[in-house]
Amino acid sequence: MSYGVLLIRVFVGAAFFGHGTQKLFGWWGGYGPQGTGGFFAQQGYRNGVVLAVVAGLCEAVGGTLLALGLATPLACTLIAIVMLNAIGSVTFKRDAFLFGSELELVYFVTAVGLAAIGPLRFSLDRAIGWDDNISGLWWGVLVLGCAAVVSFVTLTVGRTRTRSTEAAAGA
């Protein structure tokens, strides 16, 4: 099981490092803070550039920590927050239950699941003796709860408008 978790941690961590650096620096064909911030502003977020930097940091730092197996619950929380925001602001389709959000849901469930499983044998958490204290069902529940609360605040207070309110205003 340790080998499988290592594979998942490294792959998902590297993917999020890549997504984060796209937002932060424009690497890998990304748009950097200005371009990503403009997209975030179109989704109704206040201070789109600031939020793009925050999202980029969450992804890059969370991905790096996850790949290394260091502070695994924190890494999982950062990734879960970004994914819930992506689902809530971009991919969720009201006409068909969650179709269009599959990839974000897979990443979200992976993050929550890895928090519950823990980093296992091949991790820095294990090397420094943290792994016994930062895994289990309640860590998964904690990651889920923190991500839900932060995402709720970001999706409500952190936005000036949503697509549904724009559609209602235009009708």
Image (cartoon, rainbow, N blue to C red):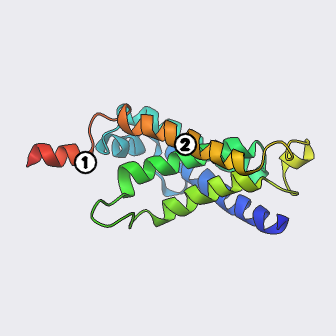
Q: Position of residue 29 (x, y in %)?
A: 49, 57
Count residues near mark 2 (Cα–Cα under 10 Å), then give few for <14, some for 14-19, many for 20+. many
Q: Residue at x 57, y 39 (%)?
A: 146
Task: State the CA–CA distance, disc 1 to disc 2.
Answer: 22 Å
In terms of depth relative to the viewer, which is nearer, 34 or 107? 107
Q: Is residue 126 visible?
A: yes
Q: Is residue 127 above or below residue 100?
A: above
Report which quarter residue 117 is drawn in: bottom right
User: What amino acid does circle 1 point to?
Assistant: Arg
Q: Residue at x 76, y 42 (%)?
A: 71
Q: Is residue 25 visible?
A: no
User: How many marks do you count on the picture?
Assistant: 2
In-image side of 70 versus 14 (left or right): right
User: Which of pointers 1 and 2 indicates the residue nearer the eye?
Assistant: 2
Q: Disc 2 marks which residue?
A: 147
In terms of depth relative to the viewer, which is nearer, 99 or 69? 99
In-image side of 130 versus 90 (left or right): right
Q: Residue at x 45, y 32 (%)?
A: 50
Q: Disc 1 marks which residue?
A: 163
Q: Position of residue 81 (x, y in %)?
A: 53, 44
Secondary-structure class at tag 2:
helix
Q: Is residue 135 above or below residue 6?
A: above
User: What amino acid does circle 2 point to?
Assistant: Ala
Q: Residue at x 51, y 51 (%)?
A: 83
Q: Position of residue 134 (x, y in %)?
A: 79, 44
Callout 1 touching callout 2 (CB < 8 Å):
no
In terms of depth relative to the viewer, which is nearer, 39 or 166? 166
